[in-house]
Image (cartoon, rainbow, N blue to C red):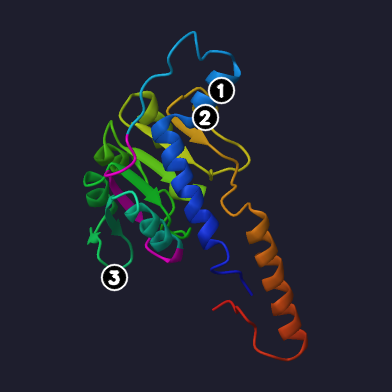
Amino acid sequence: SNTPDVLTTDVADTAIGLIIAQARHIAAADAHVRKGGWSKSEIGLGTRVSGRRYGIFGLGRIGKAIAKRLEGFEGKISYTGRAKQDVGYDYHPSLTELAKNCDVLVIAAAASAETRHSIDAAVLAALGPDGVVINIARGSLVDEGALVKALQLGRLGGAGLDVFEDEPNVPLELYEMSNVVLTPHIGSGTHQTRKAMADLVLANLSAHFSGKELVTPVV
């Protein structure tokens, strides 16, 4: 069995958190205050979150939940995925086209051999020097070498990353980048979601040993 839906809310919330933290320098501002730097220097201006162009790669349960939240920020939302859907967002047939038409690219697609390194040098180039990558899906979807290089050369504006290719290892170059927010795969890390996951596992086990159909079978 699996645990669909129970992760959706918290992972979508994490995406929004990364978007805000990256745009408004939340982590750097927190560190600045803790070091006693408030009265000594400025941390620099951030970028407005509301009204930006958001592109979502993968409009499944989590992608839709992220889009719904971004509507509250008056974001212009577009997406790409396996097929065009009956939704009120602009559809782009390729990742490159999506990247050309957004300020923030949010990765919410499933990991597979087909999607590995989907976010490559070409997509990052299309996103441009002011663009931002947010990843709450799987680290394998991003070519981390290309991402690091684009950031180092100023060809990408920033990133918010909750997942990585070789967890728990994170590219060392990212540690020194103030325009990058890093979190340790905490997308579903709330008390509520972990309890819901445990409850669902127990419900599936009970169904299995009772000879009943699983609540959430793997199909």
In front of the other: 70 or 107:
70
Q: Secondary structure at mark 2?
A: helix
Residue drawn at (35%, 31%) of the image:
150
In the rendered structure, which amino acid carries the disc numbered 2? Ala
- Eyeballing the image, is 4 above or below 40? below
Q: Quadrant of the N terminus?
A: bottom right
Q: Secondary structure at mark 3?
A: loop
Residue drawn at (42%, 36%) of the image:
159
- Eyeballing the image, is 61 above or below 215? above
Q: Classify mark 3: residues with Cα within 10 Å, few (<14), some (14-19) or many (20+).
A: few
- Eyeballing the image, is 130 above or below 56? above
The CA distance from mark 1 to mark 3 is 42 Å
Work out whether mark 1 precedes mark 3 in sequence or the reverse, and give the earlier one: 1
Q: Quadrant of the C terminus?
A: bottom right
Residue drawn at (28%, 50%) of the image:
74
In front of the other: 210 or 36:
36
- 167 displayed left or right of 144: right
Q: Classify mark 2: residues with Cα within 10 Å, few (<14), some (14-19) or many (20+).
A: some
Expressed as whole percent of the image width and height from the top left, the position of residue 85 reads: 28, 70
Expressed as whole percent of the image width and height from the top left, the position of residue 36 reads: 58, 13
Q: Quadrant of residue 94?
A: bottom left
Q: What is the number of the mark on residue 20?
A: none
Which of label 2 and label 3 is nearer to you? Answer: 2
Magenta range is 48-61
The CA distance from mark 2 to mark 3 is 36 Å
**Residue labelled with disc 3:** 85
- For the residues labelled 1 and 2, say whether their Cβ atoms are less than 8 Å apart: yes
- 76 displayed left or right of 149: left
Which of label 1 and label 3 is nearer to you? Answer: 1
**Residue labelled with disc 2:** 27
Q: What is the number of the mark on residue 31?
A: 1
